[in-house]
Protein backbone atom coordinates (compact mmCIF):
# COMPACT_ATOMS: atom_id res chain seq x y z
CA UNK A 1 0.00 0.00 0.00
CA UNK A 2 2.88 2.37 0.69
CA UNK A 3 4.24 1.74 -2.79
CA UNK A 4 0.83 2.77 -4.13
CA UNK A 5 0.98 5.95 -2.00
CA UNK A 6 -2.00 4.79 0.05
CA UNK A 7 -0.66 5.96 3.40
CA UNK A 8 -4.05 5.93 5.09
CA UNK A 9 -4.78 2.36 3.98
CA UNK A 10 -1.31 1.27 5.02
CA UNK A 11 -1.70 2.90 8.43
CA UNK A 12 -5.09 1.23 8.96
CA UNK A 13 -3.69 -2.15 7.92
CA UNK A 14 -0.70 -1.69 10.22
CA UNK A 15 -2.96 -0.72 13.12
CA UNK A 16 -5.06 -3.83 12.57
CA UNK A 17 -1.98 -6.06 12.34
CA UNK A 18 -0.41 -4.57 15.47
CA UNK A 19 -3.65 -5.02 17.44
CA UNK A 20 -3.72 -8.67 16.39
CA UNK A 21 -0.04 -9.07 17.25
CA UNK A 22 -0.60 -7.47 20.63
CA UNK A 23 -3.51 -9.82 21.29
CA UNK A 24 -1.64 -12.92 20.16
CA UNK A 25 1.73 -12.15 21.69
CA UNK A 26 0.31 -10.25 24.64
CA UNK A 27 3.33 -7.99 24.77
CA UNK A 28 2.81 -4.25 24.66
CA UNK A 29 6.56 -3.93 24.97
CA UNK A 30 7.11 -5.82 21.70
CA UNK A 31 4.48 -3.81 19.82
CA UNK A 32 5.91 -0.58 21.25
CA UNK A 33 9.34 -1.45 19.96
CA UNK A 34 7.94 -2.26 16.52
CA UNK A 35 6.29 1.17 16.47
CA UNK A 36 9.62 2.73 17.44
CA UNK A 37 11.16 1.07 14.37
CA UNK A 38 8.36 2.04 11.99
CA UNK A 39 7.95 5.68 13.00
CA UNK A 40 11.16 6.83 11.25
CA UNK A 41 9.93 5.18 8.04
CA UNK A 42 6.78 7.29 8.23
CA UNK A 43 8.85 10.37 8.95
CA UNK A 44 11.05 9.70 5.91
CA UNK A 45 7.87 9.57 3.82
CA UNK A 46 7.08 13.06 5.17
CA UNK A 47 4.13 11.67 7.16
CA UNK A 48 5.00 13.47 10.38
CA UNK A 49 1.56 13.05 11.91
CA UNK A 50 1.63 9.29 11.24
CA UNK A 51 5.10 9.03 12.77
CA UNK A 52 3.96 11.02 15.79
CA UNK A 53 0.92 8.77 16.27
CA UNK A 54 3.17 5.73 16.20
CA UNK A 55 5.54 7.25 18.74
CA UNK A 56 2.70 8.32 21.02
CA UNK A 57 1.25 4.80 20.89
CA UNK A 58 4.68 3.33 21.55
CA UNK A 59 5.16 5.64 24.53
CA UNK A 60 1.82 4.57 26.00
CA UNK A 61 2.58 0.86 25.55
CA UNK A 62 6.13 1.10 26.84
CA UNK A 63 5.10 3.17 29.83
CA UNK A 64 2.54 0.55 30.82
CA UNK A 65 5.14 -2.20 30.26
CA UNK A 66 7.56 -0.25 32.50
CA UNK A 67 10.24 -0.47 29.78
CA UNK A 68 12.18 2.67 30.68
CA UNK A 69 15.00 2.17 28.21
CA UNK A 70 12.66 1.87 25.22
CA UNK A 71 10.48 4.70 26.55
CA UNK A 72 13.53 6.97 26.68
CA UNK A 73 14.30 6.03 23.06
CA UNK A 74 10.73 6.90 22.09
CA UNK A 75 10.85 10.23 23.88
CA UNK A 76 14.09 11.19 22.15
CA UNK A 77 12.47 10.45 18.77
CA UNK A 78 9.34 12.39 19.75
CA UNK A 79 11.37 15.41 20.80
CA UNK A 80 13.25 15.42 17.48
CA UNK A 81 9.99 15.08 15.57
CA UNK A 82 8.38 17.96 17.48
CA UNK A 83 11.41 20.10 16.65
CA UNK A 84 11.15 19.10 12.97
CA UNK A 85 7.47 20.02 13.04
CA UNK A 86 8.36 23.38 14.64
CA UNK A 87 6.29 22.60 17.74
CA UNK A 88 8.74 24.03 20.24
CA UNK A 89 6.33 24.02 23.19
CA UNK A 90 5.65 20.30 22.78
CA UNK A 91 9.35 19.63 22.26
CA UNK A 92 10.12 21.43 25.53
CA UNK A 93 7.43 19.49 27.38
CA UNK A 94 8.74 16.24 25.92
CA UNK A 95 12.28 17.23 26.93
CA UNK A 96 11.19 17.76 30.55
CA UNK A 97 9.50 14.36 30.66
CA UNK A 98 12.54 12.80 28.99
CA UNK A 99 14.83 14.25 31.67
CA UNK A 100 12.57 12.83 34.39
CA UNK A 101 12.60 9.36 32.78
CA UNK A 102 16.38 9.53 32.21
CA UNK A 103 16.82 10.22 35.93
CA UNK A 104 14.58 7.23 36.78
CA UNK A 105 16.55 5.03 34.40
CA UNK A 106 19.87 6.14 35.91
CA UNK A 107 18.63 5.36 39.42
CA UNK A 108 17.40 1.94 38.34
CA UNK A 109 20.70 1.12 36.59
CA UNK A 110 22.72 2.24 39.62
CA UNK A 111 20.59 0.05 41.85
CA UNK A 112 21.11 -2.96 39.59
CA UNK A 113 24.85 -2.42 39.24
CA UNK A 114 25.31 -2.17 42.99
CA UNK A 115 23.35 -5.33 43.77
CA UNK A 116 25.13 -8.54 44.66
CA UNK A 117 22.89 -10.54 42.35
CA UNK A 118 24.01 -8.46 39.38
CA UNK A 119 27.67 -8.96 40.22
CA UNK A 120 27.14 -12.72 40.53
CA UNK A 121 25.29 -12.85 37.23
CA UNK A 122 28.04 -10.93 35.43
CA UNK A 123 30.67 -13.21 37.00
CA UNK A 124 28.81 -16.36 35.84
CA UNK A 125 28.28 -15.05 32.31
CA UNK A 126 31.86 -13.87 31.93
CA UNK A 127 33.32 -17.26 32.77
Image (cartoon, helix red, strand yellow):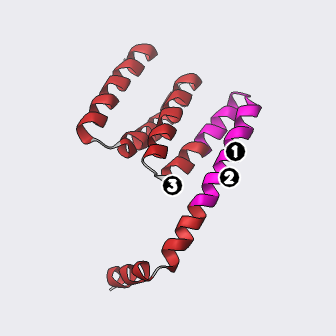
The part of the chain drawn in magenta is 76-104
Residue 5 in sight: no
Is residue 44 magenta-colored?
A: no
At label 3, counting other C-alpha atoms closer than 10 Å, the crowd grade (few under 14, some 14-19, many 20 or more) is: some
Q: Which mark is residue 69?
A: 3
Residue 39 locus on image (x, y percent):
50, 34
- Does label 2 or label 3 sit earlier along the sequence? 3
- Does label 1 or label 3 sit earlier along the sequence? 3
Report the residue marked by disc 1. Answer: 95
Residue 72 locus on image (x, y percent):
56, 50
Mark 2 vs mark 1, CA separation in Å: 6 Å
* Circle 2 SS class: helix
* Circle 1 SS class: helix
Q: Which quarter of the figure is the N terminus placed in?
A: top left
At label 1, counting other C-alpha atoms closer than 10 Å, the crowd grade (few under 14, some 14-19, many 20 or more) is: some
Please determine whether, in this image, residue 71 is positioned above or below residue 38: below
Mark 2 vs mark 3, CA separation in Å: 13 Å
Main SS, magenta region, reads helix
Residue 25 locus on image (x, y percent):
26, 41
State if disc 1 and disc 2 touch (CB < 8 Å): yes
Residue 36 locus on image (x, y percent):
47, 40
Mark 1 vs mark 3, CA separation in Å: 15 Å
Dividing the picture into quadrants, the one containing residue 5 is: top left
Q: Which mark is residue 99?
A: 2
Please determine whether, in this image, residue 126 is positioned above or below residue 90: below
Is residue 101 magenta-colored?
A: yes
Which residue is depicted at the point 28% across and 41% down? 26
Q: Is residue 61 left or right of residue 44?
A: left
Q: Nearer the viewer, residue 108 or 1?
A: 108
Q: Which quarter of the figure is the C terminus placed in?
A: bottom left
Which residue is depicted at the point 71% across and 37% down? 91
Amino acid sequence: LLRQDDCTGARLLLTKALKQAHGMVGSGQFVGQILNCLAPVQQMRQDHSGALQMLESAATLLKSAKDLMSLVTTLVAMEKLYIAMKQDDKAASCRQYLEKKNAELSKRLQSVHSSGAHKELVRRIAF
